Image (cartoon, rainbow, N blue to C red):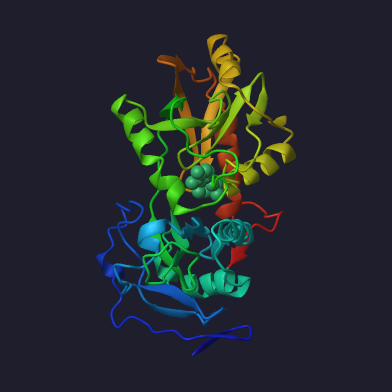
Amino acid sequence: MNYIGDMRIPMRRVAHSRIREVNWDQLELGTYNSDHMLVCDYSEGRWFGPEIIPFGPFALLPTTLAFHYGQTIFEGMKAFRTEDGRVQIFRADKHYHRYLKSAERLCMPAVSPEVFIEGMRRLVQLDKEWVPGGAGTALYLRPFQIATDSRLKLKIADSYRFAIVCSPAGNYFAHPVRVKVEREYARAVRGGTGYAKCGGNYGGSLYPTQKAREEGYDQVLWTDGVSHEYIEESGMMNVFFVIDGVLVTPPLNDTTLDGVTRDSLLVLASAAGIPVEERSVSVEELREGLEHGRVKEAFGAGTAAVISPIWQIGIDGRDYTIPVSRDGSSVGVELKEMLDAIRYGRADDPYGWNFYI
Ligand SMILES: Cc1ncc(COP(=O)(O)O)c(C=O)c1O
């Protein structure tokens, strides 16, 4: 038995680790899962103790509510191996707070920080051999929660399962992407669930994204769901522009996900003296800025790739290319280097973002 603070976390270890099956040169996210997972169940008004058990299937009836009405939420975060061999989870508390917001919006009870953060720490500690080493690699951590009542009637569930699974992720080379400003379909509307990390937001975005892909784009740039005049964010990333030398990102509201990477980049940019503005960016401003060369950079920011440079933006059937700067300098690359230096332990962590295992 193992203990976390006062909390006992029973652990059932695998008889044989699967780690030898891993091809470390080809770590596409989700190809492999680490040996163990954390599970914690809620019923009759309370959470039962978490357990760490071998990664494996859940036994759920076909009538389980999560399969039907989308009462599901998740997080996406990473544990990094530093160059001197330590393992640290990036901004666990910020992810926990976003999980709390998602849980509230989806009418779900939330697990305590002990279960989410300390439970995750214990899981990563047990599976620490699964944290790859090397530039750009990490152990991706996926906490999630689903409604587990077996009943077809739509209602707030009485029982839930919270779980954390881990998947080693390779050096995700973010090749520059081509994005389409989406002015027909919406990802989120005011009053909806856009700011929550709930399954339905992603299911609904598949069709417009597929249509954009058929037109040769990698991703969509969502606009507001009412006027389609203002840029919001990208598929699984927040978006930044460098306009007239200022780093600009759309403000947070209830239609946009409060990205942990977005927040981190804003902090780092301000500290580095880069002028920053959180403000609305209209499609018109973007179009004009692209036409007149005032938009010098555009990039998406998220846990998966940190930064995905955008090289071309499609607006109403016309494509605008952002030229690469002559001297190769880029605010996006500079910020990525600053963030990676903290996450891989090459730089001090003045903000207390790293949570050591
Ligand atoms: C819709 C959406 N926006 C933005 C992000 C970026 O958030 P983060 O930086 O926390 O990964 C994500 C990824 O989680 C996302 O799914």
Nearer to us in this view, 298 or 113: 113
Residue at the limit of the structure toward the bottom, as seen here: 1
Give me the residue at 46% from left, 61% from top: 141
Residue 37, above or below 280: below
Q: Residue furthest top?
A: 292
Determine the residue positioned at 33% across, 80% down: 14
- Examine the rendered structure and indicate whether residue 290 appears above or below residue 138: above
Q: Image check: 196 left or right of 315? A: right
Q: Is 323 positioned to the left or the right of 111 in the image?
A: left
Give the image location of residue 107, x and y in percent: 56, 62
Q: Position of residue 60 (x, y in %)?
A: 32, 72
71 or 348, which is in the foreground?
A: 71
Figure check: 211 above or below 261: above
Q: Who's the residue at 60% across and 43% down the image?
A: 191
Q: Is residue 326 left or right of residue 34?
A: right
Residue closer to the observer: 92 or 125: 92
Query: As drawn, which residue projects farthest toward the left?
Result: 21
Displayed quadrant of residue 18: bottom left
Q: Is residue 84 visible?
A: yes
- Residue 136 seen in the figure: no
Give the number of callouts: 0
Quadrant for the C terminus in the image: bottom right
Can you give x and y, in whole percent of width and height, for residue 87 in the image? 52, 65
Where's residue 175, x and y in %? 40, 34
Picture layout, residue 123 above or below residue 214: below
